[in-house]
Amino acid sequence: MHFIEPFYNWRGYYIASEDEASPFYNRQYSEFEFENRIYNYLIHPQWDHFGSPTLFMKVIYIDYDSGYAFIEFIGEWNDAIENDIMILKRDIIESMMNQGINKFILIGENVLNFHSSDDCYYEEWFEEVEEGWIATINFHEHVVKEFVAANIDQYFVFGGELEEIEWRTYLPSNLFSKIESLVNKRIGSTY
């Protein structure tokens, strides 16, 4: 797992540790010292720890003017034991929402499993984005099935083309436009 890096091709457009409004502002990274791990597996030092021992993230792009953020994840999303959604919502998402972000794109191709608890933080997040939305892209099929089984799928826009986007081939604004178009078709309205 230590070879899996967060997507870095958009670093010319955005770096969370250099963004004064980011929860990760001024965070220092090492390319050589591997400190974080998911269970017994070391992970690349560019992933951001946000309080969960099994789930790490990277905010890879934010556009404050248009109100959207791309967040990439790695690890096991565990609400049952670690309450990952509470930590994510309170410590990261609320900070972004305070800066005007109301459209969230969660990239989950490196999320290995999902373990559910209750849905109150998902519901709260969904209600607070008001005219925004939360979309997921490229989560594994078994993780999506776990979202559905936990009944939190009602708070996300996912599936279909969203699970098959070759997102690394896009510039951030172009990818957002594509995802926004798919989301708008799905929910039947425009923003």
Image: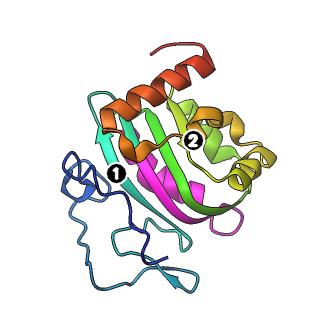
Q: Is residue 48 left or right of residue 83?
A: left
Query: What residue is shown with label 1?
Result: 60
Query: What residue is shown with label 2?
Result: 164
- At 70% across and 51% down in the image, what residue appears? 141
Q: Is residue 171 left or right of residue 73?
A: left
Disc 2 residue crowd, few under 14, some 14–19, many 20+, Cα 10 Å: few
Classify 100 as above or below 169: above
Q: Is residue 91 visible?
A: yes
* Residue 73 is inside the magenta segment: yes
Q: Amino acid at mark 1?
A: Ile
Secondary structure found at label 2: loop
For this rendering, which residue is in front, 83 or 35?
35
- At 27% across and 54% down in the image, what residue appears? 16
Secondary structure found at label 1: strand
Q: Is residue 63 left or right of residue 159?
A: left
Residue 2: mark in rendering: none
Image coordinates for residue 160, horizontal then vertical, percent? 65, 34
Mark 2 or 1, which is nearer the eye? 2
Classify 4 as above or below 166: below
Boundaries of the magenta span: 71-99
For this rendering, which residue is in front, 118 or 141?
141
| Residue lying at the far top of the rendered structure | 189
Q: Is residue 125 visible?
A: no
- At 28% across and 51% down in the image, what residue appears? 22
Disc 1 residue crowd, few under 14, some 14–19, many 20+, Cα 10 Å: many
How many numbered marks, from 0 up? 2
Q: Quadrant of residue 176?
A: top left
Colouring scheme applied when the structure was drawn: rainbow
